[in-house]
Image: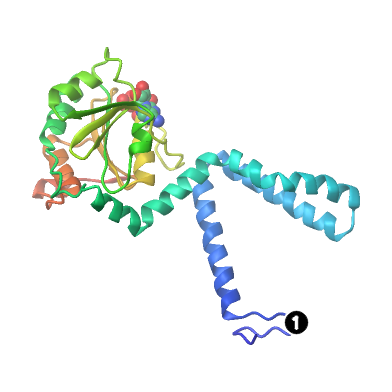
Amino acid sequence: MSGPFPINFLHFGWIDAADVLLVTVLLYQLYKLLRGSVALNVALGLVSIYLIYLVVKATGMELLTKILGQFMSVGVLASIILFQQEIRRFLLSVGKATALERVRGWARGRSAEAAPLAVGPFVEAAKSLANKYTGALICFAQASDLSTFADSGDRLDAEISKRLLLSIFNKTSPLHDGAVIVANGRILAARCIIPVSENPDVPASLGLRHRAAIGLSEVTDAVVLVVSEETGAISLVYHGVLYRDLATAELRSRLNEWLLKTPASTSSAALKPEAAA
Ligand SMILES: Nc1ncnc2c1ncn2[C@@H]1O[C@H](COP(=O)(O)OP(=O)(O)OP(=O)(O)O)[C@@H](O)[C@H]1O
């Protein structure tokens, strides 16, 4: 095949160029996913063993080739087990990027018009919780399906009310630990476990509650509200970006803008997003 790069002994065509480009993009995405986590070191270890295997095979060292060959034959299975968290996050981010997920969200009737969400109870509850230094984590589902995370907790499927939110996050409540998931204008579940961000750029001062909020927003389009137990600060996280220490008006404005798609009021222009990603 004649191609753009005629090398005497190689037939390097446009398809090969596209192939190399796609593999490069894939490897870069994998690197971005693993960067900063121990999984990157494990992956580098596996790649090194594979390279050694290729060298010993080419040089004809039979015994070592056999031993490493056995190792490589279970390598795919071992990688799936070792990297299950990373593979899950990768697949979630691929799914999130596809238009299909939006269509699914539309089909579930989750559009703002189909199920208008009253942000008032959340704003009021966040204010009360913050005043009492009670921690809270509330995830608002949009197009991405959060039912897997809801399954990790206790299903409620309850009507939204400030009183219920305060009861859930009350420190003596058996439901207060973990996250509340809100979907289709209902409180879907409480005590849910959501993915924790492994982004090394997240400030060390932020604990697990904030890291979990950032983590979920990295792999879904959910909006996450966090009330800090330590400082009483109210924050929002959206698409991996943390908006810290919000005043009530700013909180309401952002929730309206992101969940109900109504334009932000002028007060929200004062927001200083703190990049967490
Ligand atoms: N993966 C997770 N999914 C859901 N909830 C979580 C997760 N990780 C931590 N949490 C919640 O966060 C609480 C721990 O918060 P921690 O003090 O570590 O975080 P923080 O960000 O410093 O918050 P705060 O400012 O409120 O102290 C846990 O008790 C639990 O309720």
Residue lying farthest to the bottom in this orientation: 2
Dot 1 crowding, Cα within 10 Å, few <14, some 14–19, many 20+: few
In the displayed structure image, the side of residue 36 where residue 203 appears, left or right: left
The spot of residue 127 in percent (x, y) is: 15, 27
Instruction: Name above or below for residue 94 compared with residue 256.
Output: below
Instruction: Name above or below for residue 176 compared with residue 239.
Output: above
Figure colour scheme: rainbow
Residue lying farthest to the front in this orientation: 107
Quick one: 206 or 102, which is closer to the camera?
102
Classify mark 1: helix, strand or loop.
loop
The spot of residue 247 in percent (x, y) is: 15, 36
Residue at x-position 19% and y-position 25%: 165
Quick one: 248 or 186, which is closer to the camera?
186
In the displayed structure image, the side of residue 140 where residue 51 appears, left or right: right
Q: How many marks?
A: 1
Quarter of the picture containing the N terminus is bottom right
Quick one: 64 or 117, which is closer to the camera?
117
Residue at x-position 54% and y-position 40%: 84
Residue at x-position 29% and y-position 56%: 103
In the displayed structure image, the side of residue 56 where residue 4 appears, left or right: left
Give the image quarter of residue 8.
Answer: bottom right
Residue 210 visible here:
no
Looking at numbered disc 1 in the image, what kind of residue is underneath it?
Answer: Phe
Instruction: Name above or below for residue 128 compared with residue 206.
Output: above
The spot of residue 215 in percent (x, y) is: 39, 39
Q: Is mark 1 within 8 Å of ligand 1?
A: no
Residue 267 visible here:
yes
Task: Answer with the quadrant where ligand 1 appears in the image.
Answer: top left
Q: Which residue is mark 1?
A: 9
The spot of residue 140 in percent (x, y) is: 25, 39
Residue at x-position 20% and y-position 18%: 167
Quick one: 76 or 89, which is closer to the camera?
76
